[in-house]
Image: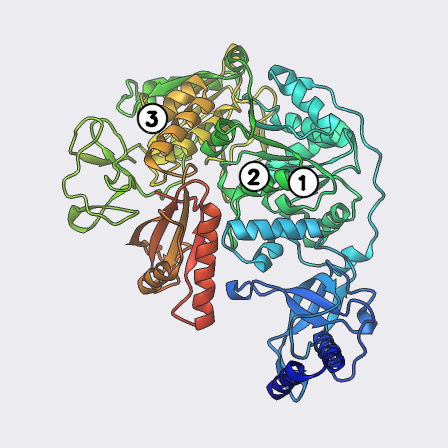
Amino acid sequence: MSRENGRSEVGVEASGTGEQLALIREAVREKKADRAKPRTWRGAELAAELPVARVLVDKGLVHLDRYFDYAVPAAMDAEAQPGVRVRVRFGAGEKGGRREGGKLVSGFIVERVAESEYRGVLAPLAQVLSPERVLSPELLGLCRAVADRYAGTLADVVQLAVPPRRARAEAKPSPPLLAPNPPPEVGSWARYGAGAGFLSALTRGDAPRAVWTALPGATWPQELARTAAAALAGGRGALVVVPDGRAAARVDEALGELIGEGRHVLLTADAGPEERYRRWLAVSRGSVRAVIGTRAAMFAPVADLGLVALWDDGDSSHSDPHAPQPHAREVLIQRSVNERAGFLLGGLSCTVEAAQLVETGWARPLTAEREQVRAAAPLVRTIGEGDEARDAAARAARLPSMAWQVVRDGLTRGPVLVQVPRRGYAPRLACERCRTPARCRACAGPLEAQEAGALACAWCGRAEPDWHCAECGGARLRAQIVGARRTAEELGRAFPAVPVRTSGRDHVLTTVPGAPALVVSTPGAEPVAEGDGYAAALLLDGWALLGRPDLRAGEEALRRWLGAAALVRGQAAGGTVAVIAEPTLRPVQALVRWDPVGHAVRELAERAELGFPPVSRMASVAGRGEDVAELLRTAELPSGAEVLGPVPLPVPDAGRPRRPGDPPPGEEWERALVRVRPGQGAALAAALKAARAARLVKREGEAVRVRIDPPDLG
């Protein structure tokens, strides 16, 4: 309807009779209704019912984070259902009453409607790639919630949640759903006070929430499998997410022994794209109700979900490197709430986020009595780096005498594990006298040494020309990585009659024989020793873990140590662990007492006092200096938001592979941190997302990277 027609109709309506007015109103309604209908495109016949498809286009641009309407040709009516993959022309223009041009892109139909709000000519769907409904309404809602939390786009999250299509896998039918398995026995869960009750609640179909601190030993895969079997016995589904393929294989084997074949699938990259998609389809079609997998499995579309479980949430592999970089813990918490499912967060250690879930009452603790802990844990002995070797053999291995004795005695009874941190950690500054981390007096961020020895905060950039330790008053600093560097070759020379095996990034061992041997491993790559486990373990270069420029340095060091020490035999069987680090430090004392929960609770209290995450919420804004400043200036941040920085980002080494978040080659970037109070995280994410979208629409400056809850805070 033209503007002239609109004015004439209004004029007639103002002066006409009642009958004329009624006729005019009816004509206007008919024109509006006709205008809302999708017009045919090049004479194509459209679907008779619900001729408009709302499509999520696979374009992860923040200013295009919405649905686009397309006409549904009659020939595609039956297959073009919500949840299927389609191809559409995107970016087409209207010319002569027709839609022209545009590139073919992929997308998903999210719904079919009768009318479109778009007033122009709707382009039709170009192709229905498959009639398989892979994006269910429940999965779509989860992806939307994750995108909003992390200031990302829905298309990016859906790309993480739905694997790429494999036509041959879709052509094969999935097996029928098997009857529920019988409830599992309590087994080793009897060692935990509330373990039997947790399993019973899952079998009844309840939704218990627990933070589980597992006892040392190799039984945690069986215990995780029992929780999944309990949920299945109650007629509901189960989802278990673990850090890596080795852990997934252990839980997969344990669950198969409990419930038999055909009731669960393993989703890991080792299966290959086609086989993994075939298993994913079995879950999506409802043929299987239990999934064990790594990070990507957190979105697995398990029907009637009764349990979500996450093992070792402190492992960095649970944080997705692809935009918007969600963490599996937060995704599974969201699923537990949305689908009213049970929740289990387990590990040998305990993160501050897990401690916060318990402190707020959202989850209950699931721990063993101290007598059980002492019976299962090995003896832990501490050795300071100032301790010297008193005999020639120990000096040859560059080990303190007591550490050398622990290794020698252990080799008489079985294999000995030697954990060596990876090289390349940047040192964090600390007081030379008491080794308290050096932090900014304004924002409590970590201090860094700049050019000419000047000190500045790595968060807000404020200079600290006259620093003094808040604990002891000392004025001298030290880099916290000063430990001796041991190698497998040196240990081999010290113990020439013993075989030496290595496990690391290039070659990770799954298991080793129970015979005497030295097993040198980097953190996280420790193999399981067959039989009763390792006779002893040596944790080298503690400063390399404790001295990382990271807010989580102490928590991460304790997690790595506990993971290695848990593979050692219990104290009653003679298992001994020697850790080379300052004995008075909090993580070392937590290891000696085997008290990860106490350490996490104290860390949480300290972060609450300093305003650190997870008590507060933070966002990282990185890019060219002028672009970061402009985005923060235009963003409508929540009241009370605190902007720290910006500070220059370090330029990555030329020989190191690029990591997510690294600046492009040849560019100098800056990073600012935005900190808000608890409860303002959603408003912060929405404000930064809106500011990014506005910049892209106006084509102002270069892109800026935004990350909510960055894990690499110094």
Report which residue position mark 3 lands on.
581
Left/right of residue 25 with respect to residue 241 in the rendered view: right
Q: Could you tell me if the residues under marks 1 and 3 are in contact, i.e. CB atoms within 8 Å?
A: no
Residue 357 appears in the rendering: yes
Residue 624 occupies which quadrant of the picture? Answer: bottom left
Q: Which colour scheme is used?
A: rainbow
Residue 670: quarter of image: bottom left
Contact, CB < 8 Å: mark 3 with mark 2?
A: no
At 78% from the left and 48% from the top, the residue drawn is 285
Residue drawn at (44%, 56%) of the image: 688
| Quarter of the image where the C terminus is located | top left
Residue for badge 1: 339
Amino acid beneath label 3? Ala
Question: Which amino acid, mark 1?
Answer: Glu
Can you tell which mark lies on residue 243?
A: 2
**Corner quadrant of residue 543:** top left
Mark 3 vs 2, N-terminal side: 2
Alpha carbons under labels 1 and 3: distance apart: 45 Å
Q: Position of residue 647 (x, y in %)?
A: 29, 53
- Residue type of the residue flagged with mark 2: Pro
Looking at the rendering, in which quadrant would you find the N terminus? bottom right
The one nearer the camera, 429 or 73, is: 73
